[in-house]
Image (cartoon, rainbow, N blue to C red):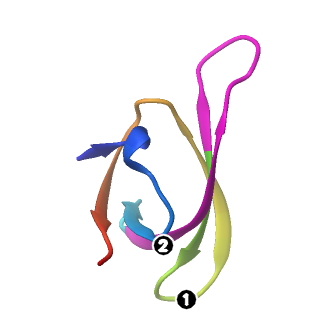
Amino acid sequence: MATTSDLSKNVFIRVDNVLLKVLEYEHITPGKGNTIYSVKCRNVETGKQSEIRFRSGEKNRHCKSR
């Protein structure tokens, strides 16, 4: 299991049993509260693009592309 700090472009992650490719990610630090990672990704099977937010330190399954 990887954490949010391991996110980068062109990495594949699995969220809710769906394989997604990371297109962009942004590290957001609000004035008060935890850091948030906003990730723009594409579903590998359907091609649908979506945006997901993770809290800092949240774990997810990921595998790097070569």
Q: Residue at x 59, y 26 (%)?
A: 35
Q: Which residues are magenta?
A: 18-37
Q: Amino acid at mark 2?
A: Lys
Q: Is residue 40 left or right of residue 62?
A: right
Q: Amino acid at mark 1?
A: Thr
Q: Residue 50 location in percent, x, y?
A: 67, 67
Query: Farthest residue toward the left?
Result: 1
Kindly identify which residue carries mark 2: 21
Is residue 14 on the magenta stretch? no
Overall secondary structure of the magenta section: strand
Residue receiving disc 1: 46
Q: From mark 2 to mark 1, how far is it between C-alphas?
A: 12 Å
Q: Would you identify the image quadrant in which residue 48 lies?
A: bottom right
Relative image position of residue 23 (x, y in whole percent): 59, 69
Q: What residue sits 29% from the left and 78% below the top?
A: 66
Is residue 21 within the magenta segment? yes
Q: Nearer the viewer, residue 30 or 59?
A: 30
Mark 2 vs 1: CB contact within 8 A: no
Label 1: how many Cα within 10 Å (few below 14, some 14–19, many 20+)? few
Disc marking residue 38: none
